[in-house]
Image (cartoon, rainbow, N blue to C red):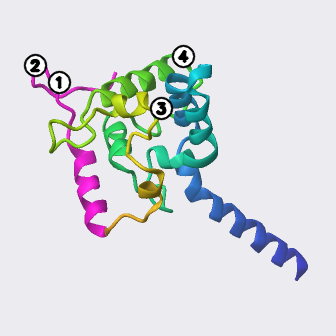
Amino acid sequence: MPRFVGFALATLVLFATLESAQALPGFQKLYIKKYASDEKQAEYKELLEKKAKCFTCHQGKKKKNRNDYGVQLARILDKKEHKKYKDEKVAKQIMQAFDVVGKMKSNPKDEKSPTYAELIAKGKLPNGKLEDSQKEPTEEEIKAREAEEKKPIKDDKKGSDKKEE
């Protein structure tokens, strides 16, 4: 009987950690490398590493729920294809995705809103306040973001769908 309890406990722990593993730590490492690697950005780096963590791209407890910034990245990157972030080619693709998404307006409905890169340059999270990303999204927000994630990214110059490289 004690073996069964030990096995059941180990299985429970394994499944409890699976959901948090959906957010890829490699993406965060590359994000920090791109946006918070020099001494001037030490405070931003600390925010990312100690407080924001997965909330840079995700919202709420379920890591399948991305915030608006995370949705835009997910439109370009594929978790399965890009999980090998240590590979130089894959890392380059992820960094390029940061550049593409960084040029997007943080609020596409407001032309005067800053781009994600402008927010990041000011030491802010791309999706706004940490508290907002920690809140559980509403069902309406989840559905809207899932629909947005399925839309192709348009190449601004040609109007054609941008394909993953």
Image quadrant assignment for residue 72? top left
Q: CA distance from mark 3 to mark 2?
A: 26 Å
Q: Quadrant of the C terminus?
A: top left
Q: Which residue is mark 2?
A: 158
Q: Which residue is mark 1?
A: 155
Q: Looking at numbered disc 1 in the image, what kind of residue is underneath it?
A: Asp
Question: Residue sitting at 23 percent across and 43 percent down?
Answer: 107
Return the disc, 4 or 2, that comes first in the chain's sequence: 4
- Other-residue count near label 4 (Cα within 10 Å), few / some / many at <14 / 14–19 / ≥20: few
* Mark 1 touches mark 2? (CB < 8 Å): yes
Q: Amino acid at mark 2?
A: Lys
User: Which of pointers 4 and 1 lies earlier in the amino acid sequence?
Assistant: 4
Q: Which mark is residue 88?
A: 4
- Residue 164, given in percent of the width and then of the height, sits at 31, 26
Q: Secondary structure at mark 2?
A: loop
Question: Disc 4 versus disc 1: distance between alpha carbons?
Answer: 25 Å
Instruction: Please report the bounds of the magenta region as a residue range.
Output: 139-165
| CB atoms of marks 3 and 4 within 8 Å | no
Q: Position of residue 128 (x, y in %)?
A: 38, 46
Left or right, residue 94 beside residue 24: left
Which mark, residue 82? 3
Front residue of 78/45: it is: 45
